[in-house]
Amino acid sequence: MTVAMTAAPQRFRVQGWDPVLIIVSLQALHYLVLSLVLPALVTIFSSSDLLQYEGGGTSIALAMDWRVFTGSTVSGIAASRKLGAGLVSLESARSATRGWTAAAAAAAGELDAASLSHGVVRVLEYDAFRGWAVALGWVIASMADIFFLYHIVRRPTHILDFSLTLVFVHLILTIYYSSSFPTSFFFWFVVGASSVVQIVLAEQLCVKREMRDGFSLGDVTPHLGVEMTPRFPDLELGQATGHGSKQSQSGDGTAQTCLRKRAWTGEEPKASLLKRMAGPSDLKAGVGGKKTADEVQRIIFEASKGSKYFNDQQRRDKELEIKVNRIKGILASKELTAKGDEEQKVDAILEELAEKRELSRVIALIDADAFYAACHELEDPSLKGTAFGVGGGMLTTASYEARKYGCRSAMPLFIAKKLCPHIKSLKMEPDLYVAASKKIMVTLEKYGPIAPASLDEAYVDLTDYCANQGVTPTEAISRLRADVQETTGLTVSAGVSPNKTLSKIAADINKPDGQFVIDSTAEACQAFIKGARLRKCYGIGRVTETLLNGLGLETVNDIYKYRKRLYLVRDHLGSSGVFRWLLSLYLGMGSNRVVRAKRGDRKTYGVEKTFTPTDNRDALDDILRKVAKSLAKDLARSEFSGRTITLSIKHDTYERVTRAFTPGKNVWIRSYEDICRLGLHLLRKEMDDRAAAIRRGEKVKGGKGPRIKARLLGLRMSNLRDDRWVKATPSKLPDMQLSDSDSDMLHESDNSDEGEGDGWEASKRQLEQLAKDAEVDPLAGDDDWDDSHGGASGSGTGRWMVVDDDDEDDVVLSGKTRSLVSRTSSLPLARPTTARRTSCSASSGSTSTSAKHSAPSSSAARQHSPTDSRASPTASTDSRPAMKRKTESTASSKPVSEFTCPVCQKTLVGSETAMSGHVAQHFEMPAKKSEKKAPTSSVTRKGAGKGAKKKR
DNA sequence: GCGGATCAC
DNA sequence: TATGGTGATCCGC
Ligand SMILES: Nc1ccn([C@H]2C[C@H](O)[C@@H](COP(=O)(O)OP(=O)(O)OP(=O)(O)O)O2)c(=O)n1
């Protein structure tokens, strides 16, 4: 024992990390503590005369035999009431063969002989004391373990593992020692409870230390030691080729996965961090082998080390680690009480889900290869085959040649240059991409309904094309791809399957200029997705993947393999829907709805700008004004106004905060002046609030400096209203707009506010009152299935995407993105489903007034969808128009040019813009008083949201 | 409604 | 030396 203790620390320093040594040391220390504490406790709690029976208080059995716990606490106490039970309890003890148990046997003999109830009680009392003493000893030792874990294990991630291993080893030892399996509830309770407490406390301490000390690379302490996650051969998707037909035009067989030796040894940062720094890239780096994955990781790491960005990544990494541990803990505790029928239950759900499988459609996802880069090659053919990236500072994409060196999307140029010294970078030219995108989409439309998911991606429903032309999906997609290449000069890759989920994954398989078709059979779908790594699935990003990894899952098939685990933690997976979503993913199911997004589907407009960090107020104001101007321009061009403006700040530390403000329910923001005024106000308020928080000693983001030092400022408008729609609709609500032009108001209003501390509130209330008018009603949309991606609305390069009809060049895409991850704990995921459900049902009826206005199209848009192909009834597809609202808003009276300021009560005549400008003035004011009240009184609280959405 | 977090491209 | 811009959803207050 002693040897181990002293030897351990040394070996750590010299050799790094040795799990076996660590567990041996912990075990030894644990027993050492027990051996010191138990005799003392037993001596204290036991009467001396009885102590003799077991030969003193120092028997090794005290530590090693689980029966010391039981002898009598729980069962014994019960036994004191009933003789029979007491006999049973002692009976078991009698079967023991060595150590102190002989004493118990003797006691039992004594009982048998005397059969005096007095005697029985006495013996049991004695045992009870001892049981408690031993339990207490165990608890003390467990708490001492916290200290050892903290100093020896160090990494929060490993606490759980080592702690459980320790208990497990003890279990084995005690079973061996006692020649019996622990059947005492008390024993399990004490051991289990102290382990839980031990794990929680130790992890918290370790996490706290890491947050405090950081994670220094030069440090040679064991916790930095290696935690290499082996790079799995990228099984991609198993050999699904049996079912699907494969047809790759490009010659390179990306398939081979060579085992690479470590490019560097010695101190290595945590794998997760390396991965984070390397980005989502698959790192199968050079097909051409110019750089190995390890080299790429190393270079990225070396270049990043020490930067503020790097530090921020470390911080995130730690937080993620905490999350992983938390869910692991939840799983561990749930497993203790698992019933055993979990897998059966899951299987039932799977069966239920599988019934809704829909295989009638042929859905394709077309994705252009290295899109931006390809667009530039089109303009300048000499670029072909050269290594270049698009974007200054940060690469938005890289040419395939550059990718051989490890260059990727979202990689800073200076790192790309280290990887590939001769890489060239081109300036972004959005117009080029938009034009190319339009061309692609036009071509795609010849093959069926399409749903653009970004500038370079779109889903196409080939069902009808195949039927009409009498061709197989494979033939159809081959034609389509050839067609696109011919008409646009761009190469695209495609995936074809019965649903969007699978097609999306399939499109990646034969990536550059290739395609992958999955047969329309349940078997083919299932077989295909089984081998896919979780990260390949739309909606599963870095965080979600890590959390699932924490539960032991690596591939989609593991969802089934570990369905019991998922089931046990299902309530901690964000929302209950996540669990089912994963199951349907495993089944290879998904939405097959292909509908184009409409103009009204856009939900926000925003502009943000990164600059070299500064804490100069004037400079920040200046930047914000420019941002405001840009945003105003976008809004004007697209004819949208918004009710809510959100300021976004990225501190020098990369920590971000957002601050929003909604003047009123019917107050529309659009002009540069309003945006600017409100934006500056939000910025100033944040500066003041932050400074105040610092003075109060509270923690704030962005470092300790009293002034905000930012590297990015952004403004975003949400709760949009389509001004075109407004224009076309004669009467409507009282429409106020904070507006520009009249700057005159500025001065006069300035003084009026001082008095009213709660001008803010007042204004809010009055405006809300004023707004109460149009009637909206509850929605009708009921159950709609999920639609993770494409359906309508989405992610992507929002700003330029071309929306449906009007050939405007505004952009809106389709697809939606839910993100997993609930903030507080657990797994992310949100269920893909329903985005609109929340927005319609959850939000108050009042807002819908505006919602209605803003998105007249969205409801109208849908009715058209799946009608033609009757075959998609309840399918797992969404199919359904969610809500069908019809009542347009009612009208309200009220001319528009005369207002009474809700704040100062003045009556103003003139443009509404003047009005808004005036009102806005009040906002600039004293944040103080309004501050207090705002939180409590403002707004109503509605509980509906959650319930509605959960159910389903 | 707000703010943080996640994800996608 | 140095790490982007745009948009969407979800959750818990
Ligand atoms: N973080 C990112 C990722 C992508 N894009 C842009 C540039 C890409 O060209 C385009 C399409 O993205 P993809 O993910 O489809 O990647 P590419 O088309 O560039 O390459 P490939 O699809 O061949 O892997 O979106 C971006 O601006 N920022």
Image (cartoon, coloured by chain):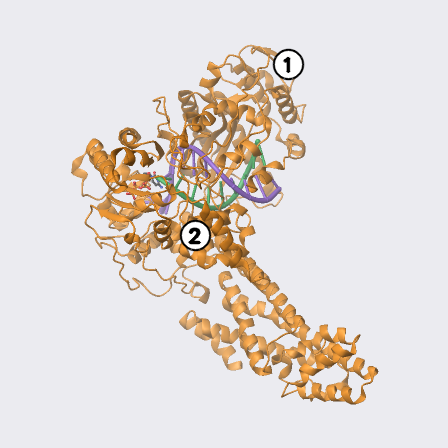
Chain colours: A orange, B green, C purple
| Alpha carbon separation for disc pair 2 and 1 | 57 Å
Tell me if A894 is positioned left or right of A809 in this view.
right
- Within 8 Å of ligand 1, the CB of disc 1? no
The earlier-in-sequence mark between 2 and 1 is 2
- Amino acid type at mark 2: Glu
User: What residue is shown at x 28% (from left), y 41% (from top)?
Assistant: A473
Asked whether the viewer can see residue A457, the reply is: no
Q: Which residue is mark 2?
A: A545
Which is nearer the eye, A900 or A65?
A: A65
Query: How many marks overall?
Result: 2
Which is nearer the eye, A75 or A675?
A: A75
Q: Same subunit under labels 2 and 1?
A: yes
Q: For the residue labelled by badge 1, is the local secondary structure a helix, a strand or a loop?
A: loop
Quick one: quadrant of the C terminus of chain A?
top right
**Is A916 placed above or below A203 here?**
above
Which is nearer the eye, A90 or A33?
A: A90
Dot 2: within a 10 Å radius of its alpha carbon, few (fewer than 14), some, or many (20 or more) residues? many
Q: Position of residue A806 (x, y in %)?
A: 36, 21
- The chain containing the residue under callout 1 comes to A
**Is A365 placed above or below A45 here?**
above
